[in-house]
């Protein structure tokens, strides 16, 4: 079997984004992973460790984790069942089936699908693949930073890393990656959308918070509770994590601008990180003294996403303009 499931993704310099923030912006293009998002790093790693001789795997997902699990299972020739909430677009169901996965739709939010996946794992003796909360997943996701560091070379160190946060699996991986390459003094800007802000709510409260509901259209960020490890990192002094929010409208604007300028379509969840550049949030953090005025290059994790096509984009636009 190949050494790992993910590919080494391009690290591109964005002239347009660099101009906006007054420092070089590097884009880590995780949208070009075989499953469409960064998820294959962590989930591929977990599957290779836990699932080779299993009866099969079961994964609960808003879409991207399911795509990664289905891809990994197909490569390993083990059966995959993916449990999705009803908010998942129909074309995602179709793509999962094309990867050979059995798909079940349960409940309205990811947490409902999660409960069902745990039940199936228990009753059918399958390996449960969580979308974000597992040390093997964080370990796999850490490769996004070690890879970027290798590409940038020893003379370039980011001024900050921008990342979207759903359940916190990518954030935990980024923290681990920064430790691995000796970049612990590089701040992380952790971006969520209003209404899918479980980490930000926890940071504000100083304790783990579970949201009542997911009201954001960025359903892939839709975990009601962040993983404990991600929250612990925000409270520790190992790394600096700046937790910030943008609106769905700002995330959508970022998706559209990114499509225009970089010719790449990503989903709303990914737009949260991009919006930090497009909405002037980075400059605000500099003005507030939370980021240095003379900022080193920004490393933006373009986490990608399978939950978007042109039809979905115009539907989101329509929906958000109607609000």
Image (cartoon, rainbow, N blue to C red):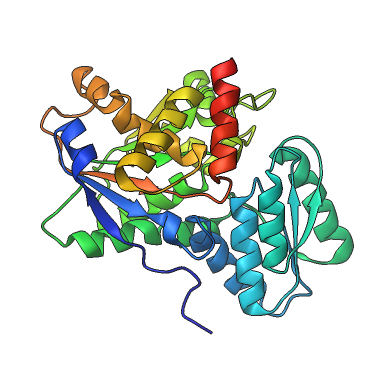
Q: Is residue 87 left or right of residue 164?
A: right
| Residue 141: % across, % down | 45, 57
Residue 319, quarter of the rendered image = top right
Question: In which quadrant will I find the N terminus?
Answer: bottom right
Q: In the rendered image, is residue 85 in sight?
A: yes
| Residue 252: % across, % down | 46, 30
Residue 219, quarter of the rendered image = top right
Q: Residue at x 75, y 72 (%)?
A: 79
| Residue 135: % across, % down | 54, 56
Q: Is residue 49 left or right of residue 160?
A: right
Q: Residue at x 69, y 22 (%)?
A: 212
| Residue 306: % across, % down | 56, 51
Task: Name the residue nearer the viewer: 47 or 257.
Answer: 257
Residue 221, quarter of the rendered image = top right
Question: In which quadrant will I find the C terminus?
Answer: top right
Above or below: residue 232 compared with residue 84: above
Q: Residue at x 44, y 34 (%)?
A: 272
Going by the picture, which residue comes out furthest to the right?
123
């Amino acid at each position: 079997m190949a050494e790992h499931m993910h590919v080494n993704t391009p690290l591109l310099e964005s002239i347009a984004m660099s101009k906006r923030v007054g420092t070089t912006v590097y884009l880590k293009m995780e949208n070009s992973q075989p499953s469409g998002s960064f998820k294959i790093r962590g989930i591929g790693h977990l599957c290779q460790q836990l699932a080779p001789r299993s009866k099969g795997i079961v994964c609960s997902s808003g879409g991207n984790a399911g795509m990664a699990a289905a891809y990994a299972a197909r490569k390993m020739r083990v059966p995959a069942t993916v449990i999705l909430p009803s908010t998942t677009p129909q074309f995602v169901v179709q793509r999962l089936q094309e990867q050979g996965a059995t798909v079940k739709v349960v409940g309205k939010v990811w947490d409902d699908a999660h409960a069902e996946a745990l039940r199936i794992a228990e009753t059918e003796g399958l390996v449960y693949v969580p979308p974000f909360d597992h040390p093997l997943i964080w370990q796999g996701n850490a490769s996004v930073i070690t890879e970027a560091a290798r590409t940038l070379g020893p003379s370039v160190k980011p001024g900050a890393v921008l990342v979207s946060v759903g359940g916190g699996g990518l954030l935990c991986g980024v923290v681990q990656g920064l430790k691995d390459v000796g970049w612990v003094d590089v701040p992380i800007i952790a971006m969520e959308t209003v209404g899918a802000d479980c980490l930000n709510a926890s940071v504000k409260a100083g304790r783990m918070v579970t949201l009542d509901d997911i009201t954001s259209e960025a359903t892939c960020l839709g975990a009601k509770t962040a993983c404990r490890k991600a929250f612990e990192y925000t409270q520790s002094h190992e790394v600096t994590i700046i937790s910030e929010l943008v609106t769905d409208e700002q995330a959508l604007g970022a998706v559209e601008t990114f499509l225009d300028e970089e010719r790449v379509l990503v989903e709303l969840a990914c737009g949260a990180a991009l919006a930090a550049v497009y909405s002037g949030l980075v400059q605000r953090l500099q003005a507030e003294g939370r980021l240095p005025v003379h900022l080193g290059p920004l490393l933006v994790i373009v986490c990608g996403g399978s939950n978007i096509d042109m039809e979905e984009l115009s539907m989101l636009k329509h929906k958000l303009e109607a609000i």
